[in-house]
Structure formats: structure tokens, C-alpha cells
Amino acid sequence: MRILIGIGNSGRNDDGLGWVFLDRIKQEAGFSADIEYRYQLQVEDAELISRAKHVIFVDSYHGVLPGGFKFEPCKVAPDSVFTSHVLPPGAILHLCRELYGKKPGADLMLIQGSSWELHSGLSPEAEIRLGRALEFFRKKLPF
Amino acid sequence: MIDPVTRVEGHGRVTVQLDEAGNVDQARFHVVEFRGFERFIQGHPYWEAPLLVQRLCGICPVSHHLAAAKAVDQIYGVDPRDLHPTATMIRRLLHYAQLFQSHALHFFYLASPDLLFGMEAPVEKRSVGAVAMEHGDLARKGIQMRQFGQELIKALAGKKIHGITAVPGGIHKTFYPEERDYFLSDNVTPSVDTMIQWSQEVVTFIKDYHDKNFMWLDSFASYPSGHLGLVGTDGALELYDGRMRAIDSRGEVTLNDVDNDSYLKYFGEGVEKWSYMKFPFLRHLGRQHGWNRVGPLARLNVCDSISTPLANAELREFKAYTNGRPNNHTMHSHWARLIEILHCAEQIRNLLNEPRLLEEVERPPVSRRPEGIGIIEAPRGTLIHHYKADEKGSITKCNLIVSTTHNNEPMNRAVRWVAKNVLDQQKAITDGMLNQVEVAIRAYDPCLSCATHAMGQMPLKLTVFDADGAVVAEHVKHPV
Ligand code: NI
């Protein structure tokens, strides 16, 4: 199993980038991975990814990314987490290793956002960056 | 990776101000930056409210969905008692599933590091990762309890995220026998019977833990307060639909089982210059004396009994510890939360075995009303949704009082307790000391994204200032 997990909130403009990426990529020919939408990652996602061969976390990015997006390996983060409601992807990978003894391949797809207001829909800039990220990812198909 | 501090504006803050002699002059828990969800929802049709409010908070979407649904039922023209019995059962089932998984997360992943490793443990120990490494069985059990609740939510809502369970005056979809049977037997997730058994185990764990650690659990961040929660007509604990009851720190009734639609008459919302979060209080007692805790501890304090036998036996024991008087020990919130987990598991089993659960629901004939108020007991406490709609059905006014807002004053008291008892007159402020501030706040399991209606993740910052305004110590925590 391969899985894409989109993180964000489509009610807050570009915070919805992760979700919209999934909405678009799932329509591509050659895309057959599982997809999951999350407001944020949860501890049980460690169990979910333990069943996967490969996982890609897709999220919006607050800050500047040359080219508008970044695709990179996701590193395990054993102690980055304090006890809070939010877990970064690296912490989920760590939990997955510790609790289930599994090491799925893992990448991050981060797309730069610029607007975080209480509105649905992406900003025009984010829409362009999303297009670039999708174009990049299409080369990985079939996935 | 994304820096949560900058991703979404606004954050929770604890500020401690020291004087020249190093005494604590002032300690506050507050929230900076406020984004109005109330404005966002204006102009939308009322029936969209249960959907839109799910965007309010990534942690509590189900609670907001249900509170809004109860409110828009009334605009649609249906009171809770007139809702089809199956619709009420389905919504209750959803609610208990949410409470169950939320409480499980809090116990196994948020509170357990403090309990298992102690408050003075080094920072790398106080993490989910450390629990996973040293208490793997516990951590996996926590995940399975979470999954049970999440799977049940998914079965009822169609999807785990932005699904629909409730629609005005009814429910979105019928629950099928095969969906129900999944939770009655062992599958990928263990059965509801196993959930009840595990819930009993964690209650036993916390009682044993209390026996060994009662010195600090009974004293840490304890202070007298009022308590508020819903009760049934028989005075029993009620989480989905009941009347509001409040008592003071000695057990005198300050709000005598009043109906939901009278909340405006009884509650005011205080404002302080230094905080965007408001301070709800009972009007007849005033801002200084009328504030109440909400959440598991408050709910067990205000109720007379619990309708399910196993949880009720635990309630008797819990109440006996304070000789039947209100329990004002903040750290007993953890104990109370686990008794509620057990109650929710029992309720889930009861509902799954209800023959009428699987009926098709017809919405009753109705006549539209201009206003609706929905109140539920969310995991963190009393949650109030209030909407007005014009004759076209567009929302003209929305007011939300979330659990974390009710707990604003109580959390401030808890922070002040730690400031006075831990940080005062110290030569140096250590990491362990700062953590104690968080331990006190964490007992309330606050949800800052709810509290600000900011629809984003809210980090928590702790700062200690000296008399000259210089930063003596600081912590920045990931969103809570
Ligand atoms: Ni919330």
C-alpha cells in the first residue's frame, strides 16, 4: 500500500493546499495510491502508515520556497514532540517504528502558501505553485 | 517543516511577571490574536452551520457539528424531545465515540508522560515518543482505543473528516446492521466489550496511581471553584442533551437545572484588556464569583449519578474520596476523565444493542423559528452554539461559548497557583518548573483553536519576565 496524507484546512485559504493536491492528483491516470485528509496528524496515523510501503505527507508551507514547493525525504523525529494535539510527520514515523517496528518510505511535499484568511479556496499564487508541484509529481506516476 | 508558530497567527501565552525581589507579581494565561468565526458564518444558510463549524477546529469537529445541529434543529422547527428516537441515538453514539477517542488521546498521549515520568523529568522524556519507547503496550492500547472511536465516527458520518451525521431535524444516513456488527465483534479494532474492559483497566491504573501519589495529586494547582455541567431530569450525568446545573465550591446549587434556551439570561461574558478570550460567569454571582470550571471534573461534581453501572460504581468511589463534597483537586480531572471514558464505552455498547438504532428516520413536520441554541457536553466541557436566521434562512447572528473559554478563569487560577507555589522566589527558573505550568493547564485539556475560533493550530508560549521586562525563561510549545 502507498498512501498520500494531505494536511490542512480548506476553510483557511492556502492552508487547504494539502487537500487540494489530493483532490487533483487522484484524478490523474496512473495514480492508484490511497489518500487520507487530515486537519492534523494523529497518533493512530502511526498505525495507518505501518501498513504502507510508502507514505507522502502533503502540507502547505508558511515561508518562502524557491520554485514554490519542496519535495524531500521525511526524517524521523524521535524527540521533536512535546505532548500536544499536533504531531509533525517525523514524529508519526518515529511512533510507527517504535510501536509497530515498521519503516515505510516517507517523503514530504510542501507547497508554499501566502494567504491564511478565513475563506475557502486558494490564492492565485498558491494555485500556480500547486500547478508546479502537481507537474513535478506527475513524473512520478504511476504511483 | 512548517513552523507552527508562524503558520497561523495567534497563540496562547502564559506570562509570569516577577518583581525586584523575584516574587511573582502577576501570572496570566491568555490568547493573543482573534479571528472571528462568527463573522465568517454570517450570511450562510442555517442548514450549512453543522458542516461549516467542523472547520472551526481540527480537534473537536464532531462536538461542534453536534452542538450546531442541535441549534439548527430548532431553527428548522424541532426540539430535542421531538427528534426521531433513532436520530437521537445515532447522534448520541457519535458523541460518545468522539468523547471516547478524545479522552483516550488525552490520557495516553498528553497526560501520561507527566504521570509516568514525573513533572521534573527532562524534556525529551516528556514526549509521546518516550512513552512509545518505554511503555509500548500502553501506547498501542491508546491507539486502538482512538481507532475504535474514530472508526465509529467514520461509520456514522460517512467519512472521518468533514463527514455528515446530523442534518436539521434528523440524520444524514441510516446505520446498517453490518456497520453495527463490526463494533460488536473483534476485528481490526477490538470489540466494544474489549473497550469497556480496557476502560476499566485505565480507571484502575489511575486509582492505583492516586494511592501512590495523592500528596501531589490532591494539592497541585488545587483551588476552590464553581462547577458547571449538564444533567438529566433525574440529576444523572448527561453529555448530549440535558439541563444546566452549577454548584459552588461547597456544593451549594448556583444554577438549578435550567433549560438551554435561558443561557443568555444566566451567563455574562467578561472581557479583560490583556486577553482576547472572554470570561463567562453567572450573572447573579458576578464576574468575580460567578465563574465555573467545566469538563470531566466539573461534570462529576454536579451530577448525582451515572446511568451506566460500571461508571456509576466508580463515581461513588470518586465522590466518597471528598466525602460527597465538590472535588476541587485540579489533578483529579484525569481520574474523572477516565470514569467518563468508561461511561462512554458502556453507552456505546448500550446503543449498539438498541434495536431501533437501525431504523430509517423521517423528519417531523415543522414550522420555522428565528433562533436556535444547542448545548452539549463536549470532551472539554459545556459547549454552547447560538444562531439567529432571517426569513430566508440566512444566518444573521452566531455566538459560541466553547469549553476552553469557560475554563479561562480556572486555567488562570491554575497558572497563578503554580506561579505562587513553584516559581516564586526562585534563584533560577528551570525547565521543570515551567513544565509545571503546563501540567496545570493540561489538566483542562484546552483546545486553543476552539477558544479563539481561529480555525488554526494555536501554539502555547510561556515567558517569565523580570522586573525590568527582560525575559528570564521561555518555552515555546507546539500547538495545543
Ligand atoms: Ni477544539
Image (cartoon, coloured by chain):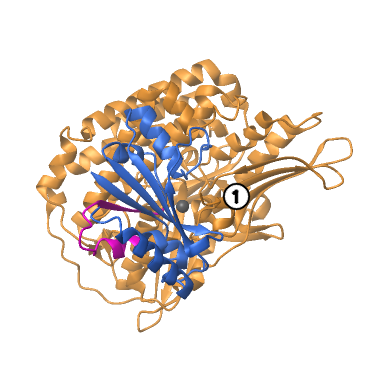
User: Residue B60, percent across and down?
Assistant: 41, 52
Quarter of the rendering containing residue B300: top left
User: Residue B433, percent across and down?
Assistant: 68, 31
- Say whether residue A54 is left or right of residue B326: left
Quarter of the rendering containing residue A10: bottom left
Which one is nearer the viewer's eye here, A114 or B396?
A: A114
Q: Is residue A10 visible?
A: no
Residue B313 sits above or below residue B399 on the image: above
Number of other residues with Cα within 10 Å of mark 1, as a class: few under 14, some 14 to 19, many 20 or more = many
Task: Identify the residue at image location x=24%, y=74%.
Answer: B366
Task: Identify the residue at image location x=15%, y=47%.
Answer: B179
Task: Identify the residue at image location x=54%, y=31%.
Answer: B331
| Residue closest to the far bottom | B392
User: Residue B320, percent across and down?
Assistant: 46, 24
User: Residue B282, percent across and down?
Assistant: 58, 55
The letter of the blue chain is: A
Q: What residue does disc 1 label?
A: B408
| Residue closest to the far top | B212
Q: What element carries label 1?
A: helix
**Boundaries of the magenta span:** A21-39
- Say whether residue B297 is left or right of residue B26: left
Chain B drawing hue: orange
- Say whether residue B34 is left or right of residue B389: right
Is A65 colored magenta in this rendering?
A: no
Residue B247 sits above or below residue B197 on the image: below
Which one is nearer the viewer's eye here, B14 or B237?
A: B14
